[in-house]
Image (tube, rainbow, N blue to C red):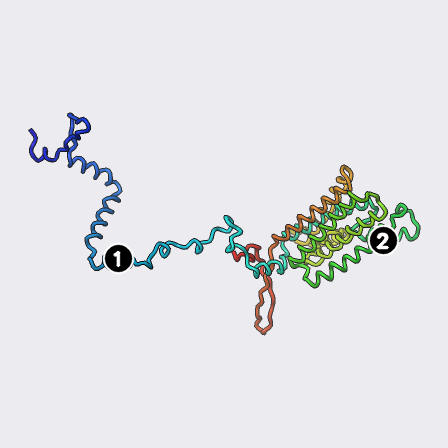
């Protein structure tokens, strides 16, 4: 027979369930099982001990002070951060007012000059590609160049002496191309001097206008007149020559004379006479070589489109290329001017290349 102490600690069976005659769970066994369950990391026991120590060591006066601190001014809003203090991420909600650039940032973005880096070189090479496509179409269709006025000047002299260089009535195409090109060069050149040629706003406006001119020429060619001479042809050549003059005016004023987008002869002479032509690092040589390759590729692309599609398709491709160039100018890194005072008291203006994100959002 078991001792009275052990019988008193024995857990009696519940009246609602059958008892287990083989073995009864005692209180010491239950306590040992619970201790074994929570003992491996000691976290539960430590928390229980710390809680008891903190509970019984605090005085009643400190408890009262703690209760007084929980007044009506102490709310959940004072402890939890306000939603407006943590604005949403710019990429998750780009149109949130706190994520939009300020008007001053937009002004700096549009009025700053673009950096003369590799990205600008690629844009000029893309313009050169469009020039090659355009001239290959205008010469095969209208017997005149839209941008290379050297050839047009030669055609004009040949016609003046009645040499059989051009078919009848094509001399009007030559005269219109040269005259409108001169007007366009004066327009884009002087207007660019006023607004500064490398400013982003001028490059965006100029290239958008050039793309619209090319698209208008494509519409006239497709919907109005497909004749190589006559009023329709003169209107198309006027639009194309005006657009080409604006492109060349922009290219010659961005401090990259090696990429003029049109004149291959001078680039080849400068390339062949370069004393450092075999140097490992030669930026000017690389630009001239890339310029010649871009012009050659553009001529082949334009000739193939004329051969297998139509002249209107060439104009559409050129307009799309100019549209892509226009959009690409939104991503150019800008030059932020900084004035530095020299030792003699003079001021020197320097430019720091700055990404678009830093100009607009300060990143």
- Local crowd size for mark 2, using a 10 Å CA cut-off: few (<14), some (14–19), many (≥20): some
Q: Is residue 156 above or below residue 317?
A: below
| Label 1: element kind | helix
Please give the label number shown on residue 219: none
Please give the label number shown on residue 67: 1
Q: Residue at x 44, y 55 (%)?
A: 84
Tell me how far mark 2 sits from mark 1, CA to CA. 96 Å
| Label 2: element kind | helix
Q: Picture coordinates of residue 45 (x, y %)?
A: 23, 44
How many numbered callouts?
2
Foreground residue among 236 and 325: 236
Foreground residue among 3 and 329: 3
Image-quadrant location for residue 100? bottom right
Q: Is residue 1 above or below residue 217?
A: above
Image-quadrant location for residue 346? bottom right
Q: Picture coordinates of residue 256 (x, y %)?
A: 68, 56
Q: Residue at x 6, y 28 (%)?
A: 1
Q: Can you identify the residue that label 2 sits on?
A: 175
Q: Which residue lies most toward the front here?
A: 72
Image-quadrant location for residue 312? top right
Q: Residue at x 8, y 35 (%)?
A: 5
Q: Are marks 2 and 1 in contact (CB under 8 Å)?
A: no
Foreground residue among 295 and 93: 93
Which circle's residue, 2 or 1, is located before the other in the chain? 1
Q: Nearer the viewer, mark 2 or mark 1?
A: 1
Q: Is residue 233 above or below residue 182?
A: above
Q: Picture coordinates of residue 83 (x, y %)?
A: 43, 53
């Amino acid at each position: 027979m078991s001792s009275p102490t052990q019988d008193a600690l024995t857990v009696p069976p519940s009246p609602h369930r059958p008892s287990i005659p083989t073995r009864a769970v005692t209180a010491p066994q239950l306590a040992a099982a619970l201790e074994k369950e929570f003992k491996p990391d000691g976290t539960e026991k430590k928390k229980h001990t710390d809680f008891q120590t903190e509970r019984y060591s605090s005085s009643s006066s400190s408890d009262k002070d703690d209760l007084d601190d929980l007044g009506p001014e102490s709310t959940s809003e004072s402890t939890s951060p306000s939603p407006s203090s943590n604005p949403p991420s710019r990429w998750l909600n780009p149109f949130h007012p706190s994520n939009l650039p300020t008007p001053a940032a937009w002004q700096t973005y549009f009025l700053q000059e673009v950096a003369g880096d590799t990205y600008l070189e690629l844009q000029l090479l893309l313009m050169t590609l469009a020039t090659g496509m355009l001239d290959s179409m205008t010469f095969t269709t209208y017997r005149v160049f839209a941008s290379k006025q050297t050839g047009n000047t030669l055609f004009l002299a040949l016609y003046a002496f009645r040499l059989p260089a051009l078919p009848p009535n094509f001399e009007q195409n030559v005269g219109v191309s040269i005259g409108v090109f001169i007007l366009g060069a004066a327009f884009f050149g002087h207007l660019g001097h006023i607004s500064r040629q490398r400013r982003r706003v001028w490059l965006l406006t100029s290239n958008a206008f050039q793309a619209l001119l090319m698209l208008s020429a494509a519409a006239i060619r497709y919907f109005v007149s497909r004749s190589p001479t006559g009023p329709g042809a003169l209107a198309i050549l006027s639009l194309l020559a005006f657009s080409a003059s604006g492109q060349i005016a922009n290219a010659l004023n961005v401090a990259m004379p090696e990429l003029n987008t049109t004149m291959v002869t001078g680039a080849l002479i400068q390339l062949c006479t370069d004393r450092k032509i075999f140097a490992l690092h030669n930026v000017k040589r690389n630009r001239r070589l890339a310029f010649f390759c871009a012009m050659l590729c553009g001529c082949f692309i334009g000739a193939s489109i004329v051969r297998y599609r139509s002249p209107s398709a060439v104009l559409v491709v050129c307009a799309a290329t100019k549209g892509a160039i226009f959009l690409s100018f939104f991503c150019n890194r800008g030059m932020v001017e900084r004035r530095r005072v020299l030792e003699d008291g003079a001021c020197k203006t320097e430019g720091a290349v700055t990404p678009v994100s830093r100009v607009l959002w300060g990143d």
